[in-house]
Image: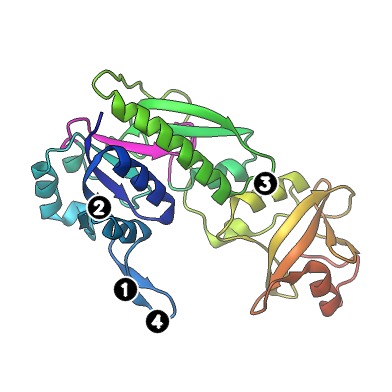
Amino acid sequence: MSRRLAFFGSPAWAVPVLEALTRDHEIALVVTQPDRPRGRGLKLAPSAVGAAAAEMGLPVAKPRRLRRDPEIADRLRNLRLDAAVVAAYGQIIPPSLLEIPRYGFLNIHPSLLPRYRGAAPVNWALINDEPETGVSIMRLDEGMDTGPLFAQERTPIGPHETAPELADRLRDLGVEMLQNVLAHLEDWETRPQQGEPSYAPLLGKEDGRIRWADPARAVYARHRGVQPWPGSWFTYGNRRVKALKLRPAGGAGAPGEVLEVGPRTVRVAAGEGTVELVTVQPEGKRPMPAADWARGRGLRPGERLA
């Protein structure tokens, strides 16, 4: 059944959600973040969703603050919406808007709510080395990801999946679930979230620092979870070095101790096991094999990385 919808989203991750909805439903309005300076010239440019919506000829609104925009509520009321769909919009939807669509606001959240409420659920599930995660289709309420659930599905996390890869896979699963919910809104009953909540705040630069005292498996889990930003990094000689590619390995030593500068990798001791640095990027330089960087800096076994 076709629905009359508003879509709230901003980054490139949300564009496939919008594209899928346009194939089966009427998108009466796309709401996205305002244009921002981008690129070398810092010219104003639309969000990825804003650009995609414009190409599809869809009406677009770009309120700076939903709470302070008196026109957006009137505009939504006049659209006579069945529902609104939210996919990584970037602003909290105020209570004054939540009850406007007939069936409320539906949100695709890439976690098993109430686990990992917040802005970075995929990243923290990986950082914490969770064996599985999932997708929740939720009706928004006034809280932070606290609304009742329409549907929820579990999926194992691959041993080498990175945050962008997992996020895209969860999004695609979420689109299928969302389409099913939209087709049966009249008959679908929501259920409250159950269990102990946990939270997934936005990542900061320090979250990418390699914790050499952690087990090698945990270092690798964090590495996968902090892609593409802030990325994994360590310091040597008071200079930051990005670890673009690394992997866990066997062996033992004092955490952060360089054990071997091999022909292709640099092996560093972790709290349990070791980490092989494969590709690095020193500050102000291009990516390079870790072994080349180490030989260029005269790095020797026994030295410590921080």
Residue 6 got which mark?
Answer: none
Alpha-carbon span between mark 3 and mark 2: 35 Å
Mark number, residue 41: 4
**Is residue 100 within the magenta segment?**
yes
Q: Please tell me which residue is depicted at 82% across the width and 65% down the height of the picture.
A: 304
| Residue at which label 3 appears | 221
Disc nearer the start of the sequence (1/3): 1
Q: Position of residue 99 (x, y in %)?
A: 17, 35
As drawn, is 284 to the left or to the right of 274?
left
Mark 3 and 2 residues: CB-CB less than 8 Å, in contact? no
Depth check, front residue: 116 or 7: 7
Which amino acid, mark 4?
Gly
Check if mark 1's residue and mark 4's residue have beta carbons within 8 Å.
no
Question: Of helix, strand and loop, which one carries label 1?
Answer: strand
Q: Residues within 10 Å of mark 4 (few under 14, many from 20)?
A: few
Q: CA distance from mark 4 to mark 3?
A: 36 Å
User: What's the CA distance linking mark 1 and mark 3?
Assistant: 36 Å
Q: Secondary structure at mark 2?
A: strand
- The residue under label 1 is 44
Mark 4 or 3: the one toward you: 4
Measured as percent of width and height from the top left, residue 134 is found at 51, 33
- SS under mark 4: loop
